Structure formats: C-alpha cells, structure tokens
Amino acid sequence: MHPWRRLRQAAPPSPLVIDGSVVAALLVLFVIQLQTALIPGQRPTTWLTWLLALAMTVPFLAHREHPLLVAAVVLSALVCYSVRHYGPYPGVNAFVLVFGVSLHAERRQSLPVLVAALAGLSVAVYTQPAGVATASTWFSTFLFTLVAALVGENLRHRRARWAALEERAGFLEMEREERARRAVTEERLRIARELHDVVAHSMSVIAVQSGVGHHVLDTQPEEARRALAAIETTSRSALTEMRRLLGVLRQDGESRAALTPSPGLADLPFLLEQVRKAGLDVTLTETGVAAELSGPVDLTTYRIVQEALTNILKHGGPSAEVRITHSPTELYVEVLDEGRLVDVPAAASAADTGHGLIGMRERVAVFGGRIVAGARPGGGFRVAVHLPLTSVRP
C-alpha cells in the first residue's frame, strides 16, 4: 500500500487530545509572557492573574459542544484581566477561540462568537494603560480576529467538502463492487449455460447409444459397434468443447491462446449427424438469404437447436425438423418433433438437468428476442425463437 494512503487511513487523534494540546500550548505561552518586564501602568502577577489565565484557556476543551458558553467565559475573563491591567495583553486566547468555534461550529454560532470577541477585545484594548494601546494595536487586533474567523470558516467548508467527496467515493466503490459481483454472477450463469448445453447434449446421445448397444449387443453386433462409434465421437466432441471452455476460463486477459472456435450455424450438419446416429431422424430446412451473424448470435442459435434436439432425443421422437428462416432484420429458428418414441430405451431419459428451457430463455433475452416453447396440438413439442439482428452488437 502507498505510504500516503496508509497515512490517510490511520486513525486521527481524538478531539480531546487536540484541544488538550492547544490548551497546554496556550498555558505555556502565557507563562512565558508573564516572565517579561512590566510596562508602567501594569500590575504584577497575583493568584487572580493565574485564575483568570486558567479561565481564558481551559474552557477551550469544551468549545466543540458548547461554543457560546465557552465564549462567554473566556471573553469575560479577558475583559476582567484587561480591566485589572495585568500584563501582558492576552489577545492570542481570543484569536484561538474564534478560530476553533469557526472551525467546529455552524455559522449561526460562530458569527455571534466573532461579534462578541470583537467587542470584548475592543474593551480589552481600550482599558490598557497609556502607551500600550495604539492605533496599530487596534488594527492588528481586529485584523487577526477576522483572519482567525475566516480561516476557520474556510477550513470547515473544506472539511465538509472532503467528507462529501469521501462519502461519494465510498458509494462509488460500493457500486463498483456491486457491478463486479453482478458481472461475476452473469459470467457464471453464461458458463453454466455453456456447460449445460455441452454436457446435456453429449450425455443424452451417449445414454441413448449405450442403451441401444446394450439391447442389441448379443443379437446385432454390427449395430452395437455403430452405437459404440457414436459414443466415441460424441465423447471426443464433448471433450473438445470442454477444453475450449476451460481454455477461456484460464485466459489472463492478455493471452490469446489458440482455442477451438465457438460452434455456430456452420456446425449444424455435424450436430444433426450426431443426433441421427443416436436414433432421431432429423431434417434441416433453411430459407432466405443468410446474413453475416455476430459470434454471440451464431453461438446462441447453435445452442438453441442443440438443446431443443437434446430434449427431443430424451423425451420425443421418432423424427424432428429444424427450420431456419433468414431475413435482414431477424433470424427465426423453429424445432419441431412428432411425439414420444414408443420403444425408447430407458437410458434415454436419464440425466435430465431440467434447465434446458431456462437456458434458452436466458440466451434469447440477452438479445431482446422472443421464444415460444410448448406442446403441439397434434402431439409433439415446438420451440420457436425470434432473434432480432438490427439491435445486436457484435
């Protein structure tokens, strides 16, 4: 941590310590001044001198809580001290009082104290012996009093501004941390969706193929081999995508390691081939002129088709149809199936996470699109997605 930052974060001295130090300094100064030679007309030091000296300095300890009362005591003692013609002239005590009240009290309290101090100091100067009070004494007394008030007022405003700035900085820091937490949560949700899409689809294909292989292992060895080959291909593909996701998570922001590109519409034929090997007869129909899609939209479209086919593979069948319609402003994706398979192996319904539709809705919501998913009147299931292209930023 920077040393200046550590200094700012260090706990400041307590007000009592600060005010006590000021009182001690004033008393020391008073004692030093009393050692000077007296001017003709001034009285020597007595017990009353020390009592008035204490009355002009010690009450400063309470000026933060009771500024008006402290000012009354200090200025009364100052006037008594001056009327008795004790030396030397103790104007410093009044200057410090005016400064402290202006610094720590509101203007409705500091202004009366300033007026009272000017009045008390005027009386004190007026009652000084001949030759002590001159025109320069009057001028310097009034000038120092006003300067003390102005400096205290200015510092009070600066402290208030600093407090407001620190409060605002604290609020902005909290807001930044909240944004960071939201970003982490959103990133976790994105990764969870990616993992769900990869794992759920691959495990569903593997479950179906392993069930088929188990049923035909003794009667149809060739069919069992094809099922094992499909399991191998699907598992390798899943591992590749898992490595891609882990590679993204391990990147340090500056590193740009060569990773397998995210899947998109161009990879649909391979996806459909995987599904066909799993036993689902699926067809793809594309209409319209395909526009160049941004990476996020391309990936989202692929994942929606993948998740819809995975759900059909687990719960529907025996055939499905994927329809993709391109337009300049929108991409329309529809996935249909005809209903549940009669002879689906029991393993086909295993490992259903139940988050497929939720993940699809979240993906579509990112781009301001619409999704409709539900049972078809004649049987089967339908997923229809509208992805706007004009509002999507690559």
Image (cartoon, rainbow, N blue to C red):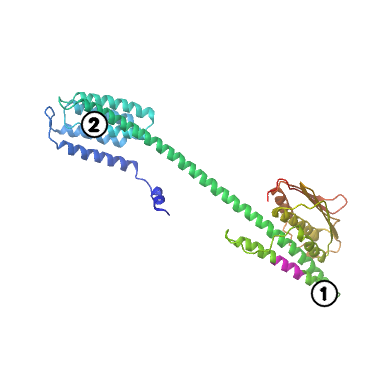
**Residue flagged by tag 1: what amino acid is it?**
Leu
Type of secondary structure dominating the magenta stretch: helix
Secondary structure, mark 2, is helix
Residue 237 in percent (x, y) is at 72, 66
Q: On the image, which quarter does residue 347 sit in? A: bottom right
User: Could you tell which of marks 2 and 1 lies nearer the N-terminus?
Assistant: 2
Q: Which residue is mark 2?
A: 91
Residue 192 in percent (x, y) is at 66, 57
Secondary structure, mark 1, is loop
Q: Residues within 10 Å of mark 1 (few under 14, many from 20)?
A: some
Q: Residues within 10 Å of mark 2 (few under 14, many from 20)?
A: some
Magenta range is: 231-239
Q: Which residue is mark 1?
A: 217
Q: Residue furthest right?
A: 378
Determine whether 59 is above or below 188 in the image. above
Judged left or right of residue 85, residue 63 is right
**Residue flagged by tag 2: what amino acid is it?**
Gly
Question: In the image, which is nearer the foreground, mark 2 or mark 1?
Answer: 2
Residue 272 in percent (x, y) is at 80, 62
In the rendered picture of this protein, how many numbered marks are placed on residues?
A: 2
Give the residue drawn at x 19%, y 31%: 89
Q: Which mark is residue 340?
A: none
Q: Nearer the viewer, residue 130 or 211?
A: 130
Give the residue drawn at x 28%, y 41%: 20
Q: On the image, which quarter does residue 35 sit in? A: top left
The Cα–Cα distance between marks 2 and 1, rounded to whole angstroms, is 110 Å
Residue 351 in percent (x, y) is at 73, 62
Q: Is residue 355 visible?
A: no
Q: Is residue 128 magenta?
A: no
